[in-house]
Image: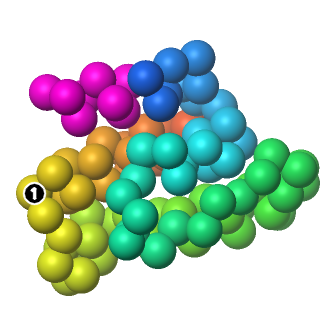
């Protein structure tokens, strides 16, 4: 439940805003996941957004996270973030 609160806090006001979600993912993911923070200035062009989005989905794809031996909480966070990014990507595209 506390994970849901954390995820909602992270996504608040950014729903459907792919650039904002991508540039703040480090605040909701765990340190060992391998995500490198990306600044908003790196997400100006559509091509750069696409590149970072691909990187993000590879990093937090539920199957990949499971292969890396993530905890139950990490899998849950990854799945929720993955779904939000996918939704935002559909709006962005």
Residue occupying image coordinates x 47% and y 30%: 10
Q: Nearer the viewer, residue 4 or 82?
A: 4
In this picture, is 83 found above or below 65? Answer: above
Q: Nearer the viewer, residue 69 or 16?
A: 69
**In this figure, which residue is indicated by the disc labeled 1?**
72
Instruction: Name the quarter where the N terminus is drawn.
Output: top left
Region in magenta: 1-8
**Is residue 39 among the parts visible in the rendering?**
yes
- 72 within the magenta span: no
Q: Main secondary structure of the magenta part?
A: helix
Q: Position of residue 79 (x, y in %)?
A: 27, 51
Q: Position of residue 3 (x, y in %)?
A: 23, 35
In this picture, is 37 found above or below 18? Answer: below
Residue occupying image coordinates x 58% and y 17%: 13
Q: Is residue 76 left or right of residue 33?
A: left
In this picture, is 85 found above or below 78? Answer: above
Q: Quadrant of residue 37?
A: bottom right
Q: Position of residue 83 (x, y in %)?
A: 37, 44
Q: Position of residue 93 (x, y in %)?
A: 68, 44
């Amino acid at each position: 439940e506390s994970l849901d609160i954390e995820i909602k806090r992270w996504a608040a006001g950014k729903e459907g805003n792919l650039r904002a979600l991508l540039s703040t993912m480090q605040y909701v993911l765990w340190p060992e996941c391998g995500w490198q923070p990306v600044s908003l200035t790196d997400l100006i062009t559509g091509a750069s957004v696409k590149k970072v989005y691909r990187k993000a989905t590879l990093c937090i794809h539920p199957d990949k996270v499971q292969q890396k031996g993530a905890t139950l909480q990490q899998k849950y966070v990854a799945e929720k973030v993955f779904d939000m990014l996918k939704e935002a990507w559909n709006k962005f595209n």
